[in-house]
Image: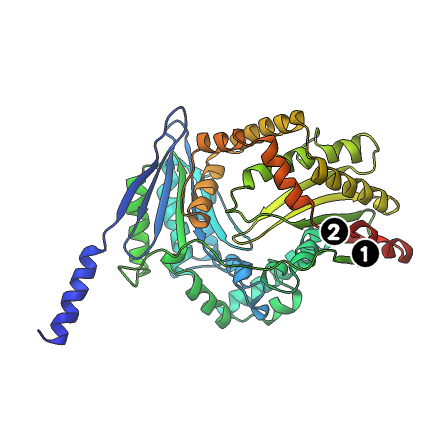
Amino acid sequence: MTSRNARATARTSSEARAVARTQTLIKGEHGIGTVRKTTLPGGLRIVTETLPSVRSATFGIWAHVGSRDETPALNGATHYLEHLLFKGTRGRSALDISSAIDAVGGEMNAFTAKEYTCYYARVLDTDLPLAIDVVCDMLTGSLIREEDVDVERGAILEEIAMTEDDAGDCVHDLFAHTMFGDNALGRPVLGTVDTVNALTADRIRRFYKKHYDPTHLVVAAAGNVDHNKVVRQVRAAFEKAGAFRDPVAEPIAPRGGRRTVRAAGRVELIGRKTEQAHVILGMPGLARTDERRWAMGVLNTALGGGMSSRLFQEVREKRGLAYSVYSYTSGFADCGLFGVYAGCRPSQVHDVLKICRDELDHVAEHGLTDEEIGRAVGQLQGSTVLGLEDTGALMNRIGKSELCWGEQMSVDDMLARIASVTPDDVRAVARDVLGRRPSLSVIGPLKDKQASRLHDAVA
């Protein structure tokens, strides 16, 4: 056999193996939707959750790229690209894109995070084919023209300025830098004025081609949708754009790797003339794949997840030292954060920090009461279900699950995992996470003497 014939035979054999693979991941019952997944030749994954009882549908495309995939010089490129995909394709202008969805009463948007980006449209179920066509066109046919890059630069710089004006928002970026330092997870998703000004159309185009291959994408649709119809429409849109370059390519795996968090006990302060001081006291948390995350969720809820939580009661209800006080967790592929936020008068900063540190230390050493844990389990179960009451939330759940975990978990399974958390589980994770030395980020008009005392909170 000649080498040419051998290559032709191998290609024919590969193409024969390149068939769409469809499976049912969750069988719908008791009002829960049926979740199905199809992997197309070329590595594009399509997941749907079908709920025949609703009249809406949300369609989204998730990209396996976020700000942590950027080099220092490219900081902000992922978010910049998110804006540019709305600026026009070979077949649609920016006005065509927005007016198509507006004309049917739908809504369309996108968001960029540290590890993924999502583009979505929510419409009536009868208008789902339009949403699929528009969003797929944006993702596969964006022009990224020089003039659009220049125009959108101004809008992004205004977005950065808007964030800088909101100290309660800005302090979260500061805390990420405090914990992770000057690496990808520690840099702001929006980028900085300097990095955004330095980005060119050519660099953004190269970033786009590298990270928006079908193997890096997950298509998700939820609501009154027909899985097979969604697959046919998405496949046709991607084939029309010539997006499938390798018929036997497989989807990339969920993120892995290892990242070291900055040393504990760090303090970062930005002096700013604000009415309040905004503080975050926190420490390394858990990766999103850590099996202890269910216990961590219960712990977080009991500590600062609602009006009955310890921090809310101690800081606001009993002493009136802050209006907003809460705790939160952020899980990434290989690490995580736990933080306590409070906004208070500058003169009250040290009192608030002492109370928060005392509560964290107490829970780390003694744990929570069974009553607190039981209340947190119920609160977490209820908020989980209530948070999935619209098709947008359902689309987010199945899309993110496929991209980040490579699997789906039914609502019943999630509720069972929360219910299975024991007081010993919560106490163990409290000792491990809350027992670490914290770090601190503060934005506000603190005087020199006040600022010098901040290290007391992390000693």
Who's the residue at 52% across and 52% down the image? Answer: 333
Counting from the top left corner in percent of width and height, residue 119 is at: 47, 50
> Is 227 placed left or right of 345 in the picture?
left
> Is 420 placed left or right of 177 in the picture?
left
Can you name the residue that lies furthest to the right here?
A: 449
Asked if labels 1 and 2 touch by Cβ distance under 8 angstroms, the answer is yes
Can residue 434 be seen at all in this image of the molecule? yes
Q: Tell me the CA gap for discs 2 and 1.
A: 9 Å
| Nearer-the-camera pick, 54 or 294 | 294
The residue that disc 1 covers is 272
Disc tally is: 2
Counting from the top left corner in percent of width and height, residue 201 is at: 50, 70
> Is 204 placed left or right of 163 in the picture?
left
> Is 216 placed left or right of 376 in the picture?
left
| Nearer-the-camera pick, 215 or 60 | 215
Counting from the top left corner in percent of width and height, residue 98 is at: 48, 50
| Nearer-the-camera pick, 329 or 208 | 329
Which mark is drawn over residue 289? none
Q: Quadrant of residue 357?
A: top right
> Looking at the picture, which amino acid does disc 2 mark?
Ala
**Relative to 373, is 405 above or below?**
below
The residue that disc 2 covers is 167
Can residue 389 be seen at all in this image of the molecule? no
